[in-house]
């Protein structure tokens, strides 16, 4: 029966495509695509759209192009009415709907999970499912197959389910969750846009907002699927027992993430040392904190560790950091006259702060010369300390050479006691 219905549907489509009115439909579809392309191109030239969901990277690879083309095609089909038999529109509208679904899902997943390899598999799966669904819809197989699947039923408690209802529920749930991810992503970008000192607070707000929207989206998806939400009470109890035993560490990390963002004990951009790893905090997620060292290494630290262990924060109250370097000069050097010149040389080095300014102290009487300690401050430790210390040392060397001050090197006197006794 399905094979004969499919053959009849395909025969009708082929007969309609051979009709003279099909050329009119084809021209209208091409016109719809051209209008959508021109409109998207005009919008893309006026707004910044690097990787956006609506416009993508090249304008036509976003969601807006197939949406406009679909709207224009539906409008054109409505304007034609019954003037010509429907042939091209029967093919174009399902194809454009599938393209909208694919573009929306792929773009949202790329924005929400940019580094996830699993999402790449999901994107390909969605594309295959959408195109197969479009083919089944055009050939008339999909309604017949869904009717057959609705006949396969079983009971779960007092709820009667069918294979068709389960497939429909999965589809509706996926659409709702994708739309929820899209809305949360847009709101998160708005919250984090232009964030300065309050970046951590905005990050906390965006995490809370995403969690809330995902929860609401899941509830709406379950309701659309016909699942009784009162049954979630038992599920909530089971989840509570699971959290109390196997998931307590995971729950502790999530709670610790919100505590860190709320207390602002550490913030994005702070220079910290955790468990012997020093670096700059680049991101605070709900489960972990990312710390990037100056040499490019990154450490993923569970948020619970940031709460229960000792954390050294070099920029909690003040981003300024004190650095120092040591140089020796000969004992014959006029140190009191040399010190102001060294201070002036260090103060002229970029990144060295004028307040508090650099200072030079006579720190020790070494065996080979007078030891001078030069201290100075910087307010951008995330840019590295070794490079600014090297610049300071070069400035000191140039000043000592200009003043004719010699940097002493170790010297030893060797006395030959045996030859003296023989004489």
Image (cartoon, rainbow, N blue to C red):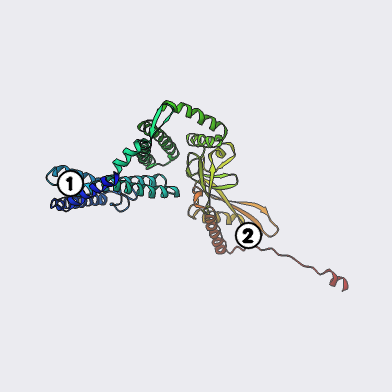
Of residues 284 and 97, the one nearer the viewer is 97
The front one of 219 and 167 is 167
Image quarter hosting the C terminus: bottom right
Can you tell which of label 1 and label 2 is closer to the viewer? 1
Q: CA distance from mark 1 to mark 2?
A: 100 Å
Q: Are marks 1 and 2 in contact (CB under 8 Å)?
A: no
Which disc number belongs to residue 333? 2
Q: Residue furthest left?
A: 83
Q: Quadrant of the N terminus?
A: top left
For label 1, the residue is 86
Where in the figure is residue 413, as x and y percent of width and height? 75, 66
User: Percent x, y for residue 126?
Assistant: 37, 47
Sort mark 2 into few (<14), some (14-19) or many (20+) by Cα contacts within 10 Å. some
Residue 101, label in figure: none
Report helix, strand or loop for mark 1: loop
In the picture provided, is 209 more to the left or to the right than 255?
left
Residue at the spot 48% in from the left edge and 38% down from the top edge: 286
């Amino acid at each position: 029966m399905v094979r004969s219905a499919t053959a009849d549907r395909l025969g009708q489509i082929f007969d309609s495509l051979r009709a003279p009115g099909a050329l009119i439909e084809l021209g209208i579809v091409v016109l719809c695509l051209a209008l959508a392309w021109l409109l998207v191109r005009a919008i893309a030239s006026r707004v910044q759209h690097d990787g956006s969901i609506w416009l993508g990277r090249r304008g036509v690879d976003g969601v807006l192009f197939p949406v406009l083309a679909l709207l224009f095609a539906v409008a054109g089909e409505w304007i034609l009415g019954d003037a010509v038999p429907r042939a091209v529109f029967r093919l174009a509208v399902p194809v454009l709907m599938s393209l909208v679904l694919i573009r929306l899902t792929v773009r949202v997943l790329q924005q929400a999970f940019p580094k996830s390899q699993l999402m790449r598999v999901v994107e390909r799966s969605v594309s295959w499912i959408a195109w197969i669904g479009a083919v089944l819809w055009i050939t008339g197989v999909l309604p017949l197959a869904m009717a057959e699947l609705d006949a396969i039923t079983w009971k779960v408690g007092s709820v009667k389910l069918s294979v068709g209802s389960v497939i429909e529920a999965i589809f509706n749930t996926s659409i709702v969750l994708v739309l929820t991810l899209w809305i949360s992503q847009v709101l998160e970008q708005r919250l984090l846009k232009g964030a300065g000192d309050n970046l951590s607070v905005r990050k906390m707000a965006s995490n809370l907002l995403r969690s809330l929207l995902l929860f609401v989206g899941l509830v709406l998806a379950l309701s659309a699927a016909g699942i009784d939400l009162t049954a979630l009470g038992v599920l909530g109890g089971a989840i509570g027992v699971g959290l109390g035993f196997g998931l307590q560490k995971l729950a502790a990390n999530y709670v610790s993430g919100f505590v860190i963002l709320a207390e602002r004990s550490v913030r994005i951009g702070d220079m910290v040392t955790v468990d012997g790893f020093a670096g700059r905090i680049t991101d605070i997620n709900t489960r972990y904190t990312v710390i990037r060292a100056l040499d490019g290494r990154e450490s993923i630290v569970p948020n619970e560790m940031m709460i229960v262990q000792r954390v050294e924060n070099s920029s909690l109250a003040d981003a300024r950091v004190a650095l120092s370097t040591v140089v020796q000069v000969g004992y014959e050097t006029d140190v009191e006259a040399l010190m102001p010149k060294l201070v002036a040389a260090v103060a002229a080095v970029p990144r060295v702060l004028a307040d508090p300014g650099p200072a030079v102290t006579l720190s020790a009487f070494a065996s080979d010369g007078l030891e001078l300690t030069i201290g100075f401050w910087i307010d951008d430790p995330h840019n590295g300390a070794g490079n600014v210390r090297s610049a300071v040392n070069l400035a000191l060397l140039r000043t000592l050479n200009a003043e004719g001050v010699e940097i002493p090197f170790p010297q030893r006197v060797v006395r030959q006691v045996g030859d003296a006794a023989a004489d």
